[in-house]
Amino acid sequence: MSDSSAKMVKTVIDGKEYSFPEGMSIFEAAKSVGIEIPHYCYHPGLSIAGACRMCLVEIEKMPKLQISCYMKVAEGMVVHTSCERVKRARQAMLEFHLVNHPLDCPVCDQAGECGLQIYYMTHGLYFSRLGENKVKKAKKAFPLGPYVMLDQERCILCSRCVRFSSEISKTSELGIFERGDRSELDVFPGRKLDNPYSVNVVDICPVGALTEREFRFKTRVWYLESAESICPGCARGCNIYIHYNLKRPYKNQGKRISRLKPRYNPEVNNWWICDEGRYSFSFVDKEDRLLKPLVRLDGTPASPGWNDTLAQAAESLQSTAATTKGEMAVLVSGRLTNEELHFLKRVFNEQLPGSRFYFSALTPYPETEDNILRKKDKNPNTRGVELIGLGPGSADIGSLGELKSAAREGKLAALYLAGHDPADLPEPEGAEWAEILANVPLVIYQGTNASATSLKAHIVLPAAAFAEQEGTVTNFAGRVQIQRCAFQPAGDSLPGWEILSRLGEALGGEYKLESARAVFQDLALNCPAFAGLDYDKIGSAGIIYK
Amino acid sequence: MGRVKLISRFLEIENCRSLAVYEAHGGYAAARRVVAENWPMDRIISTVKASNLRGLGGAGFSTGGKWGFVPRDMEGPKYLVVNADESEPGTFKDRHIMMNAPHLLLEGLIIAALSFGAEEAFIYIRGEYFEPYQVLKKALDEAEKAGYLGHNIFGSIRSLEVTMHRGAGAYICGEETALLSSLEGFKGWPKLKPPFPAVKGLFSRPTIINNVETLSYVPIIINQGPEYFAGLGVEKSGGARLFGVSGHVNRPGIYELSLGTPLSELIYEHAGGIKDGRALKAVIPGGSSCPVLTAEEAEKINLDFDSLAKIGSMLGSGGVIVMDETTDMVRVLLRICRFYANESCGQCTPCREGTGWMTRILERIISGEGSFRDLDNLVDISGMILGNTICPLGDAAAMPVMSFVTKFRKDFEARVKASATVKM
């Protein structure tokens, strides 16, 4: 944010002199040296409202306290962020915020992550002197749109959501109506809070006024654990936190993922994610997850366990390769991690030479796109496919159309599907594929959930979902980012790279590696596009390949 | 010192609403002269500066000084906005000017526009002022027809388009930045400062906002010379202004006094003294937001900016509210408090929540449920609002509470004692 050419000014904050770029707010300046100033209305991604008055600080030579979110540092300025006067003012502002707040924390979803609760503990701690009735407001537990619920009485009128809807989603559904302490947040008459980014207002709401309809009453936030990840919903690769609940498994019907929250990355998604991405996790805890490897070679399904299944898969592949002249086809998906792609390529090229790779970016999801975050390509790693040499543009990589004709013409001896459910694609594609798959002698499916495709497969290899394994994906701009493992894979499913490494071993190769990290380092050694990249340097923000 | 007839001279002329009558009494001579002599901006500004004219809407900022803040080297439009949203309880001077001498305001507006090169002006008039709106609109049409406004004013190459806009009933729109928001078509919410409107105002352009009365003095200052105006009243706080006296006096009304005139002279001489010979109890010197004066303070104080500031009050908008010994100070404060709670725009927290909170405490005291702690809380809460809000409405709501409860503590204590007796 601060470019090196900016003029620097010397400002004293809490007795220490610092140098800050001219034009920086006192709030950001203080934050940059580790001083957190309490605030509600300020949000670095939105315009300044100056409404909550929580961030008041004392500036020497100015008679009044000033809001630090708006005032800029200046040469020779002396700022006090925690003198008695400021502390008293903070307490006062907090008390004002609570004058008409219903204090219904026991039934409020925000409890545990509420700005009012937090600042009461850190800056409040006064005795209540409120003997007055509170202003009643009409809309409580009122749906504003498909995902967001409003409680007007809990609202502290910080206007973050209003500013988000006018400045970021640019849809302007929200406004503050009436005056004084009758002011209330609402949608404009006849409008709904229904835009592709609507749930971000829940993230930025500092209190329990705006809550997620999906998440309400499912889990108390203090039972949640968090893992850093990358949204699997499109090629943008928005940075997210997976909030999951293992501590109270009986809550939320045993679903482990409670919600996804955006994670700040100025190079990718800033503070936001789209609603499609936010709700892209439901497959992880769905009943139709594939929990055991399955063999259906002679028509009757059996679950002989991983070793036998992989041995049978290897044997079938090898005998097919040996006995028929047909093609060994692999359909590669942009939903796979770089590590999975790397082993897919190595195992088939090395153990079953002559295998042909096909690629398609087609998914069952609508190809929505805008100039905020959403990308038309709904795969998180199409760029990774290209860089590893399995995508369009690489020599001898077939298209979905070519795969279809090859299958129709009976040229396919075996088809290995990884991360693709072609039979689940929107019609007419889906039905067509159901028919095609029936004509391929050997179909091996590696995936997370049961699907029309997995039902047609002769061998089903259950794979871990993005939250259950570690791995890297490369976004459309070439940024390599890590999806961390939040919890163990469902049932007997395994991380995709591990399935492939064990299949490779069953086919007679050497693929024993311990972790996704080790596979990535192997990728960096073998794939020119990834040369020189160090897994340990990817970090939270990702790195861009050269 | 004492009564003067600068603006009031025009207020007293019969049918001064009409252009012909106004001109027959020397109207538009100042504007005509400034245009004909092609006064440079600096000359207009220095003349008004020398007159010591200060903003009479309430803030009391140097008028010439304000005009001088408009950046000269900026391309594009600059605007003059007339704040005719007179709404401070106890204030009714601008209405008289617009009703009786609208051309005086328009002439001042022309000169002000010339002082910083505005070619477009807006008059934001309080929505409830429908009659003044009609009168002013008629005067505007007349002046346009005569060629004093519009294209080529007074036959010169200069132009000045004036647009009138009626407010929709919000007191807050009298606050200059809220007025600009409203004029721009947004909710009437005050804006953060800086930047000040003189640099970035209406539609983000340099804008000067002046009160009706302030502008009405400008032609008089040009005609009579700045020294004359500055020489009125007392040193440092020169000039004159209209005082609107209301409350328990025999002759409520508008009185134009040179600054520095004793408040007692205004009450007892000009306004005819307290009704029925009762004793004075309290005076709010400049509209309901100004800290109240006790009778003792009121008897001694002179009406000028500095004298009132010295005792912790303000000259404000010149609305003098006189209260006699029969006044129930608790009820008066509730009335004032309720007003500000109703009119708080709700944008920033201390004012939004504090005004309602104080009102509800006062309601409880009046209903007989008050306690001594409530009195301390009222003073404390008003102190928590004071100086901590985006715009001066918070201060306007806080100052009466602080001053009433502190200066008339006995009245409040009697009320909570009485309620304690009832409870026991």
Image (cartoon, coloured by chain):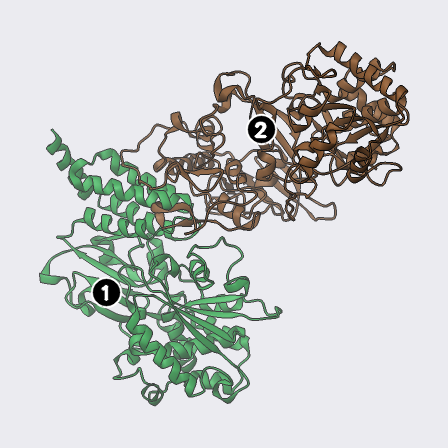
Chain colours: A brown, B green
Q: Quadrant of the N terminus of chain A?
A: top right
Q: Is residue A16 visible?
A: no
Question: Is B326 in front, or is A103?
Answer: A103
Q: Amino acid at mark 2?
A: Ser
Q: Quadrant of the C terminus of chain A?
A: top right
Query: Could you say which disc has been placed on residue B156 in the image?
Result: none
Q: Position of residue A128 (x, y in %)?
A: 33, 29
- The residue located at (41%, 43%) in the rendering is B349
- Where disc 2 sits, the SS reads helix
Write down the quadrant of residue A529 in the picture: top right
Compared to B255, does B381 lie above or below? Answer: above
User: Residue under mark 2: which chain is it in?
Assistant: A
Q: CA distance from mark 1 to mark 2?
A: 71 Å
Q: Is residue A546 left or right of residue A485?
A: right
Compared to A14, does A416 lie above or below? Answer: above
**Labelled pair 1, 2 in contact (Cβ < 8 Å):** no
User: Residue under mark 1: which chain is it in?
Assistant: B
Q: Amino acid at mark 1?
A: Val
- Where disc 1 sits, the SS reads strand
Q: Position of residue A269 (x, y in %)?
A: 65, 40
Q: Position of residue B65 (x, y in %)?
A: 49, 66
Q: Nearer the viewer, mark 1 or mark 2?
A: 2
Write down the quadrant of residue B377 in the picture: top left
Query: Could you say which disc has been placed on residue B245 in the image?
Result: 1
Q: Is residue B252 visible?
A: yes
Query: Could you say which disc has been placed on residue A282 in the image?
Result: 2
- The residue located at (88%, 25%) in the rendering is A349
Number of other residues with Cα within 10 Å of mark 1, as a class: few under 14, some 14 to 19, many 20 or more: many
Question: Is B302 in front, or is A76?
Answer: A76
Number of other residues with Cα within 10 Å of mark 2, as a class: few under 14, some 14 to 19, many 20 or more: few
Q: Is residue B9 left or right of residue A200?
A: left
